[in-house]
Image (tube, rainbow, N blue to C red):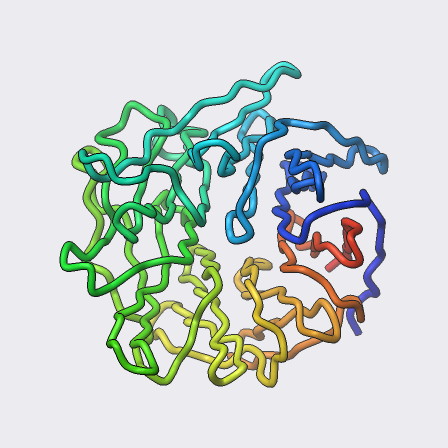
Amino acid sequence: MAAAFTFETVAGGVSEEVSLALDKTGNPSVVFSQGGSGQIVVARRNAGTWTQEVVQSAFTGMDSRPRIAIDSLGNPQIAYRDLTGGDLIHAVNRGGQWSFTHIPTRLTPDHRPGGVSTIDFALHPGRLDTESRDVAYFVYVDPATDGIGFAHTGNLGPTPVTVQDDPNDLMVFGGPSAAFDPSEGYFVAYVGLFETGGPQDDISIRATNVVDIESGTFSPPAVIEGSPFINVRRPTSIVRTFSGGCLAYFDIASKTLKAHVMSIGFARLEAAATNINNIVTPSAAAQGDEFRVAYADSDGVKLASRSRTGTWTVETVDAVSAGSPSLAYDNAGRTSIAYVAGGELKYATRAQ
């Protein structure tokens, strides 16, 4: 029998979208937006004590949750959409001081609106390519083209570049997520929507990866699932391991949390959870070589776990109405989940 979760209340007055990251010793950091004020706040737990720090006072965007990662030196790095111009902001804390960079994201040279909407990012692990260690790789929706853009903070090649757009404006793209694999490949998942003009658009789930960072090229997108009978309106979530990966997303039409699982010798689409009565943004992670997806249904925060034989089981972590959770695992396999319920930031953890 699995150990029970323990719960902590971290902060109050919190907007629903949060992002969780763990440092090398398993200490959690959570970035969130303060409800009402819109301030970006980072809560960090060390030696059992939570502290909070206001990072920035200008943030907006329901679908633009701030994102956090911890670099190789234990410093928090954050990506978020600012309030004034919708720019992609990269904030880094070094030596106790925050620095802020406006990341160039415009994919067109004309005067159409700039800025970003949904964003995700990951830090280059730098185990093999040590010169790229801690370089931030961003993926985002470009409102000017309704395409997916990519940018980075390194001196590696062109930035920004287009991952995919449609110059004929028949397709729009959204819901990007990104992850590095242990061999330092960078993978991106997102949603494509073909506007048919009829009552039902044709929606597809797509995945690609960086082929050549020096030229800024991505592989041709693989269509994981495409049909006029699916409906995906929230961001995807992707995780990669040594042996494969998992791409999770919620299909409103079938009320199903779907997971495209890749491993050595096979790739298949699986139902991780069914009969979901909430429009959810999932959070996928790997516990060792097994995949997990956290999500919030109308009756609780839940965790879908996949066994080595391919069987998914679902457990209720906390029977509350909550916003989209963020899931992470440390090197010991401990489960950590951050989420907002009743305006309070909650942190749940369980030993393996």
**Quadrant (top left, top right, bottom left, bottom right) of the C terminus:** bottom right
| Closer to us: 258 or 231 | 231
- The residue furthest left is 168
Q: Residue at x 78, y 33 (%)?
A: 46
Q: Is residue 336 visible?
A: no
Residue appearing at x 78%, y 52% in the figure: 343
Q: Nearer the viewer, residue 92 or 102?
A: 102
Q: Nearer the viewer, residue 329 or 188?
A: 188
Identify the residue at horizontal 54%, vertical 24% (top origin).
Answer: 92
| Image coordinates for residue 289, horizontal then vertical, percent | 52, 62
Q: Nearer the viewer, residue 312 or 224?
A: 224
- On screen, 75 above or below 183? above
Residue 290 in view: yes
Establish if 279 lies above or below 44.
below
Query: With respect to residue 297, does 84 lie above or below?
Result: above
Residue at coordinates 81% horizontally, 35% vertically from top-left? 50
Q: How many marks?
A: 0
Q: Is residue 165 left or right of residue 28?
A: left
